[in-house]
Image (cartoon, rainbow, N blue to C red):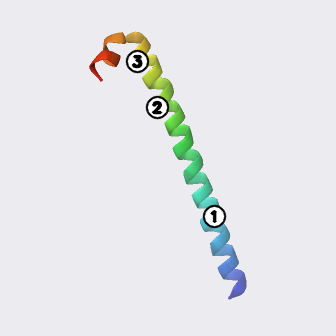
Amino acid sequence: MCVTYVTNHFLVYILLKLTALIIQVISHTNAKLVAKNLRCYPNLGNIA
């Protein structure tokens, strides 16, 4: 019982860490893409 609980807790912890990491990577990639787009289309910055 205790072992199962600890294992599940550990799996949830890893899952949360992975999710946070993926979100971080996606945010970083999006930021890069936005910066790239702003460089290509300077007018977008004025509209937004």
Task: From the viewer's perspective, tell me whether residue 8 is left or right of residue 31.
Answer: right
First along the sequence among labels 1 and 2: 1
Pointer 3 local density, CA inside 10 Å: few below 14, some 14–19, many at least 20: few
Q: Which sits earlier in the primary sequence, circle 3 or circle 1?
A: 1
In percent of width and height, residue 31 lies at: 48, 29
Report which quarter residue 42 is drawn in: top left
Q: Residue at x 52, y 45 (%)?
A: 23
Kind of element beneath mark 1: helix
Helix, strand or loop at mark 2: helix
Which image quarter is the N terminus in?
A: bottom right
Please name the amino acid that badge 1 sits on: Tyr
What residue does disc 3 label? 37
Q: Nearer the viewer, residue 3 or 16?
A: 16
* 24 vs 28: above or below: below
In the rendered image, residue 17, in percent from the top left (x then y), is placed at: 62, 55
The kind of secondary structure element at disc 3 is helix
Q: Is residue 22 above or below residue 12?
A: above
Residue at figure coordinates x 63%, y 67% from the top left: 11
Relative to 1, residue 14 above or below: above
Q: Which residue is mark 1?
A: 13
Residue shown at the point (58%, 59%) measured from the top left: 16
Answer left or right for 23 relative to 9. left
Q: Disc 3 residue type?
A: Asn
Determine whether label 2 and label 3 are within 8 Å by CB.
no
Q: Position of residue 28 (x, y in %)?
A: 54, 33
Looking at the image, residue 21 lies above or below residue 9: above
Label 2, on which residue? 30
Distance of mark 2 from mark 3, alpha carbons? 10 Å
